[in-house]
Image: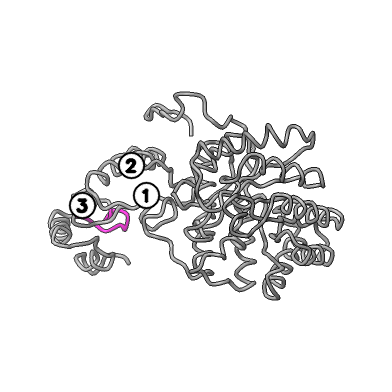
């Protein structure tokens, strides 16, 4: 978002951390890591296909279509999604999660061959000292496992995406050793993970910079570097943007921040922030539909105060706020009305500002509410509605306000 005559933008007072024109890729984890959230229901394949097409409509670059080694249902859904992509010649590129074991990678090979499209194999294993202690693993064992898994995937024609869990808490020597081994044996994408939500933005930046300098550049190969972060400290968006500033090419995220424990980087807020930073120019009007469809399919709820897509994101019943929005609207500039009491322009996401009537409201709220519904306003009507609102403990419903209006008012 550029500075204009009515906003001074301190975000632009120094050069941005992410250079203008930087291409940022997004990998949607909703249908894999998102479904590891203990509260979700696994959607039907019909619902997953509908969600897949919404991802496509939002310009999301790639999608994790499942972990087919997890069982028959997972394998069947993964294949159906891959076939949907192939049949419809969709732009979105599929990948699948797999443990660094042949039994998990082989189902991806089989699905790729049957469907006839490339499916990137995202092979993962734990790497941090604490995980090695719990599992009685040595770094030598991890290196051998890495070599075997990546080699198997590449030899069977799969693009290889190599992932270490808990990268952010892994010592530099192990990070360097494992990723260098993966690249040496054919991995052309590597994923750095904040599996337990430990990172701060500086930590994410530092890790990405280290891997570029110590692993990617010395390899001499063209490597895509991804960031996969969880939200345990509430820093997932900040960490993902810091990783991009450090040189990451792609960010993994999930709708409504679904995922293990408190979830992944929220896809919808990555899209919002990238749009506001002028790093993407996609049509994001389907964003709310995408999030609501995922919530319905997984039987989860979107909190009313959730940014951008929550019910209250562009809704106010406060008199001072409403008065300013009304005055801006009367100037005939929807951008002015969007900006005066919101840091996110609603119209960019197919939404609009809403003014309600409640105990904190003023006369402007009532006049605006009536005007939007083409109900004639007189002092007596406005007074009755405002008096009722002041005595209420909450925002009035449409039906409650309409009860004060003449019977001839349109519904």
Q: How far apart are marks 1 and 3 (CA)?
A: 15 Å
In the displayed structure, does residue 282 sit left or right of residue 184?
Answer: left
- Residue extent of the magenta highlight: 369-377
- Quickly name the residue at label 1: 353
Tag 2–tag 3 contact (CB < 8 Å): no
Tag 1–tag 2 contact (CB < 8 Å): yes
> Which residue is drawn at the image coordinates 31% and 41% (left, top)?
330
Q: How far apart are marks 2 and 3 (CA)?
A: 15 Å
Q: Which mark is in front, 1 or 2?
A: 2
Q: How far apart are marks 1 and 2 (CA)?
A: 10 Å
**Which element carries disc 3, helix, strand or loop?**
loop
Which of the 4 image quarters holds residue 373? bottom left
**Percent coordinates x, y for residue 376 in the rendering:** 24, 57
> Which residue is drawn at the image coordinates 59% and 34% (left, top)?
246
**Which element carries disc 1, helix, strand or loop?**
loop
> Which residue is drawn at the image coordinates 34% and 39% (left, top)?
340
């Amino acid at each position: 978002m550029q500075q204009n005559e009515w906003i001074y933008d301190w975000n632009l007072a120094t050069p941005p951390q992410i250079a203008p024109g930087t291409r940022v890729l997004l990998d949607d984890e909703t249908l894999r890591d998102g479904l590891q959230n203990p509260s979700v229901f696994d959607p039907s394949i019909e619902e997953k296909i509908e969600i897949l097409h919404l991802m496509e409509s939002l310009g999301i670059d790639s999608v994790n279509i499942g972990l087919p080694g997890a069982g028959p249902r997972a394998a069947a859904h993964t294949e159906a999604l891959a076939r949907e992509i192939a049949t419809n010649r969709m732009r979105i590129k599929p990948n699948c999660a797999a443990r660094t074991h042949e039994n998990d990678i082989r189902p991806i090979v089989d699905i790729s061959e049957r469907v006839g499209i490339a499916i990137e194999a995202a092979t993962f294993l734990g790497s941090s000292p604490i995980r090695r202690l719990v599992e009685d693993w040595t770094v030598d064992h991890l290196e051998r496992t890495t070599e075997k898994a990546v080699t198997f995937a590449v030899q069977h024609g799969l693009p290889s995406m190599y992932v270490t869990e808990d990268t952010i808490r892994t010592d530099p020597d192990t990070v360097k050793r494992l990723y260098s081994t993966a690249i040496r044996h054919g991995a052309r994408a590597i994923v750095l993970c904040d599996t337990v939500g430990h990172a701060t933005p500086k930590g994410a930046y530092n890790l990405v910079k280290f891997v570029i300098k110590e692993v990617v550049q010395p390899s001499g190969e063209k490597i895509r570097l991804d960031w996969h972060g969880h939200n345990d400290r509430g820093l997932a968006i900040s960490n993902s943007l810091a990783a991009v500033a450090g040189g990451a090419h792609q960010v993994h995220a999930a709708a409504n921040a679904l995922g293990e424990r408190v979830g992944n980087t929220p896809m919808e807020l990555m899209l919002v922030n990238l749009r506001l930073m002028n790093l993407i120019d996609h049509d994001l009007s389907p964003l709310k539909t995408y999030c609501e469809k995922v919530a319905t399919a997984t039987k989860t709820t979107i909190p009313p105060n959730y940014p951008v897509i929550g019910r209250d994101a562009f809704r106010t019943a406060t008199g001072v706020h409403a008065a300013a929005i009304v005055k801006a609207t009367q100037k005939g500039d929807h951008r002015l009305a969007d900006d005066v009491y919101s840091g996110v322009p609603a119209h960019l996401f197919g939404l609009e500002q809403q003014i309600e009537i409640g105990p904190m409201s003023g006369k402007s709220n009532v006049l605006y509410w009536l005007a939007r519904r083409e109900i004639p306003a007189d002092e007596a009507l406005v007074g009755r509605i405002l008096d009722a609102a002041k005595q209420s403990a909450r925002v009035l419903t449409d039906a409650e306000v309409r009860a004060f209006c003449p019977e001839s008012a349109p519904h």
